[in-house]
Structure formats: C-alpha cells, structure tokens
Amino acid sequence: MSVRFRPPAPQPESPMIPLRDTIPSKNYPVVNNSLIAVNVIIYLLELGHGPGIEHFIYLYGLVPARYSVPHVAQYFTTGQQIFSLVSFMFLHGGFWHLLGNMWFLYIFGDNVEDRLGPLRYLVFYMLCGMASGFSHFVFNLNSATPVIGASGAIAGIMGAYFILYPKSRILTLIPIFIIPYFIEISAFFFLGFWLVLQFLQAALTSGKTAGIAWWAHIGGFVFGIILLKIFLLLPEPHISKKIRKATVKKKTCRLQVIRPIGRSNEPHLYGSIDITSGEALKGTSKLVNIPWGFHKRLIRVTAPPGISDGTMLRLKGLGKKISDDRNGDLFLKVNIQ
C-alpha cells in the first residue's frame, strides 16, 4: 500500500508565542522533562529512516482509515492498530513542528505536573493525547492521511493550566511584521484566545488544509479540562509523594516578578517575595522585576540569614512619588515555601 505523507505545515498555530509564565514550579518537572527528551530522541530516530520515513509514519501515525475502512485495516495486525493510538503523539513532521510543541510543553507542563504529581501527570498526558486522537478520528473517519504530533496531548495540558492557573501572567511575543512586541497577558486570555483560534481554523479549513489536525487540538483541550476534574478527585499514589520529596526545589527562582499595590492615601507600595526554608535559614539574594508603567525596574533584594515567614523587607525610595526629591517605600512580605 502506498500513501503520500504530508507533514504538518511549519507556520505557527497562533500569532502569540509564550516566552514564560509567572507561576514557578515547586518541584523539578522530571516527567515533563522526560517527555520532552523522549520526543526529541524519537524524532532523531525518525530522521534515520531516510526515504522510508513515509512508511514509518503511516505505520506508527494515527490514520483514521486504518480503523474505519475494512480493506485498509486488513494490512495491519491488532497490535499495530493499538500501538499507533499511542505512538502517533511521539512523532513529528519536522524540526519546527517538534520545537513548537516542546516549547509549549515546557512552558505549561511543569505547573500541571506540580499540581497532579509525576505519576498522575504522566497518565493524564497520555490520556489527553489519546483523547485528541479520538477527536480527530470522529471528524475525519475515512481519512488516509497520517496524523502525528504531541500537540493534542499538549492541548490537554493547556486545558488543565487554563483551569488551574487562570490568573497567571504569560510573557508573550507578538510579531508585528518584522517588529517583535512583548506583552504580559493573563493565562485565561492567552489560552482562551488559542482555543477560539482552533475553532475558527477548524471551521474555515474543515481540518483538511495546512496539514494541521485542528479537531485534535480542540478535543485535547476539552478532554484536558474534563480529565483534570477527575484526576483531582483521585488520591495521589504514595510513590508519587516520595518522588515529590526527592525533586523539591531547594531554591526559588532567582528572578521574580512583583506587581506592588498601594493605597490611594499613602505613598508606600506593598508586594511579596517567595523563598524556600533553606534560603531563609542561610540567607539569599534575588533579582526582582517590578513593572512600572511602560518601564520595568530590576533591583536586587537580600533576605538575611534566619529570616522568618511574614517578615517585611523595606526598600527605601521605591514607592510612589511624593515630591521631586522624595519617594515612598516598597515593602515586600517574605513568603517561605
């Protein structure tokens, strides 16, 4: 059997590119990093197939016709049919396809793993990927075009992030012609806009052009929300808790973003800074990024050894302007994690 594989188009699926979020993970994301590594390794194995890559993709990608058309299904064993329901989400059609997917997984996956724990997160990721494949199958029953990529599973991760951290801020790059424009927007808006864009693309292209499985993205996102609700009701396995203890971060992020607030009738501003118990014991120094209108201040904040939770650090002259030569102060409350 011969089939022409059409790799996913290299253009971005959204005009907005996330650069980082403002929710630091408390544990090292061992599962998320491992998933990224596995995807990269399998992509390198793909490259080794050379001219046989089309057969490889057709064998291990998700092809709806393999399940819905009897004379196509007869070419595959039951084991091959079952295995491709999982293997398709670890294959990619090119370097940019891989890079885009892994970047989104890197940005959003660590926080979801933090919330679910490593084992629940791994199962959650796999189920989201399989659910996205099912969504594509429903809307493309007789398609003989292989669907590959982790974007459906990652869409499920994004759906979970949408529910768990809607108030998180996403530093976003928006290319305007050749001029890069950077802006911080809420995760609720960023992910909501992304989902609406998937619906628009699916409606306009019927999922048959550009080589992108829009309904797999939509299905992954929706199933991610549903599965999250279920997984949060399930107890975390004991071994997962042990992994959490072994992977807890000893230090918080060296660079922290603080958005101070203040009362209208006083010149002082108030915010908070996060450190770990180990940092509180030994003392630590952090770089603090403070948005200020259209500018941002970057200052160094030092927490002395033995500092306790709730201590207020006073930064003189970083509050509201009182007069030409005088400013109020900025007070940072120490939160020990």
Image (cartoon, rainbow, N blue to C red):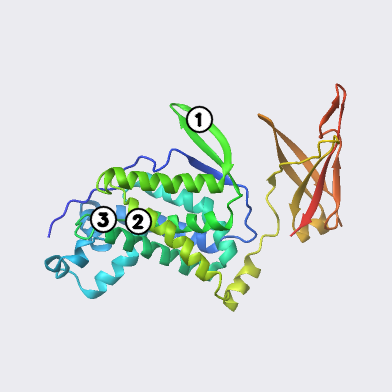
Q: Residues at badges 3 and 2 in contact (C-beta under 8 Å)?
A: no
Answer above or below: position of 292 versus 2: above
Which residue extends farthest front?
265
Question: In the image, 182: left or right of 298?
Answer: left
- At label 3, which amino acid type do we have? His
Q: Nearer the viewer, residue 196 or 12?
A: 196
Residue name at image x 41 percent, y 67 percent: 127
Question: In the image, 237: left or right of 208?
Answer: right
Sequence-earlier tag: 1 or 3: 3
For the residue carrying disc 2, how many other residues have a C-alpha within 10 Å: few (<14), some (14-19), or many (20+)? many
For the residue carrying disc 3, how many other residues have a C-alpha within 10 Å: few (<14), some (14-19), or many (20+)? few
Sequence-earlier tag: 1 or 2: 1
Question: In the image, 298: left or right of 240?
Answer: right
Q: Nearer the viewer, residue 182 or 44?
A: 182
Which residue does the numbered mark 2 point to in the structure image?
216
Which residue does the numbered mark 3 point to in the structure image?
49
**Could you tell me which secondary element the residue under label 1 belongs to?**
strand
Mark 3 and mark 2: span between their CA atoms? Answer: 26 Å
Mark 1 and mark 3: span between their CA atoms? Answer: 37 Å
- At label 2, which amino acid type do we have? Ala
Task: Examine the image and state in which quarter residue 185 appears.
Answer: top right
Quarter of the image with the N terminus in it: bottom left
Q: Nearer the viewer, residue 328 or 121?
A: 328
Quarter of the image with the C terminus in it: bottom right
| Res. 61 in view | no
**Could you tell me which secondary element the residue under label 3 belongs to?**
loop
Which residue does the numbered mark 1 point to in the structure image?
180
Answer above or below: position of 234 versus 165: below
Sequence-earlier tag: 3 or 2: 3
The percent position of residue 289, horizontal first and vertical second, equals 70, 39
